[in-house]
């Protein structure tokens, strides 16, 4: 369960990062998301019981969230 919000934040960070590269805007949003992802992701990863399941779930949610919510609009 720890990986679900972190995966969503990673998907948003990817979407904002790609938008930043293409349009040169939303720099603060990207930096804020990246910092939050590193801090909260690190804390959640330390508390996860099974690190492997956490990593796989985070990668799956990140990819699914990006391709469903952000990729169609970029």
Image (tube, helix red, strand yellow):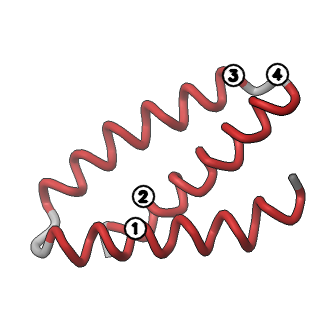
Q: Secondary structure at mark 4?
A: loop
Which of the image's four quarters has the N terminus?
A: bottom left
Q: Considering only order in the chain, which callout, 2 or 4, is on the residue closer to the N terminus?
A: 2
Residue designated by label 4 = 24
Foreground label between 2 and 1:
1
From the viewer's perspective, tell me whether residue 73 is left or right of residue 51.
right
Foreground label between 4 and 2:
4
Q: Are marks 1 and 4 in contact (CB under 8 Å)?
A: no
* Relative to 14, residue 25 above or below: above
From the viewer's perspective, tell me whether residue 10 is left or right of residue 43.
right
* Crowd rating for badge 3 (residues with CA inside 10 Å; few <14, some 14–19, many 20+): some
Q: Secondary structure at mark 2?
A: helix
Q: Are marks 4 and 3 in contact (CB under 8 Å)?
A: no
* Spatial separation of the CA atoms under disc 4 and disc 3: 7 Å
Which of the pair 32/52 is nearer the observer? 52
What is the quadrant of residue 37 in the picture?
top left
> What label sits on residue 27 in the rendered view?
3
> What label sits on residue 6 in the rendered view?
2
Q: Secondary structure at mark 3?
A: helix
* Spatial separation of the CA atoms under disc 1 and disc 4: 27 Å
From the viewer's perspective, tell me whether residue 14 is left or right of residue 50.
right
Q: Secondary structure at mark 1?
A: helix
Q: Are marks 2 and 1 in contact (CB under 8 Å)?
A: yes
Residue designated by label 1 = 58
Q: Identify the residue at horizontal 31%, vertical 37% (top origin).
A: 39
* Crowd rating for badge 2 (residues with CA inside 10 Å; few <14, some 14–19, many 20+): many
Foreground label between 4 and 3:
4
């Amino acid at each position: 369960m720890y990986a679900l919000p972190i995966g969503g934040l990673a998907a948003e960070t990817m979407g904002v990062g790609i938008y930043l590269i293409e349009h040169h805007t939303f720099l603060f949003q990207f930096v804020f998301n990246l910092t939050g992802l590193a801090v909260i992701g690190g804390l959640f990863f330390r508390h996860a019981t099974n690190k492997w399941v956490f990593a796989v779930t985070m990668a799956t949610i990140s990819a699914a969230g990006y391709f469903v919510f952000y990729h169609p609009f970029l």
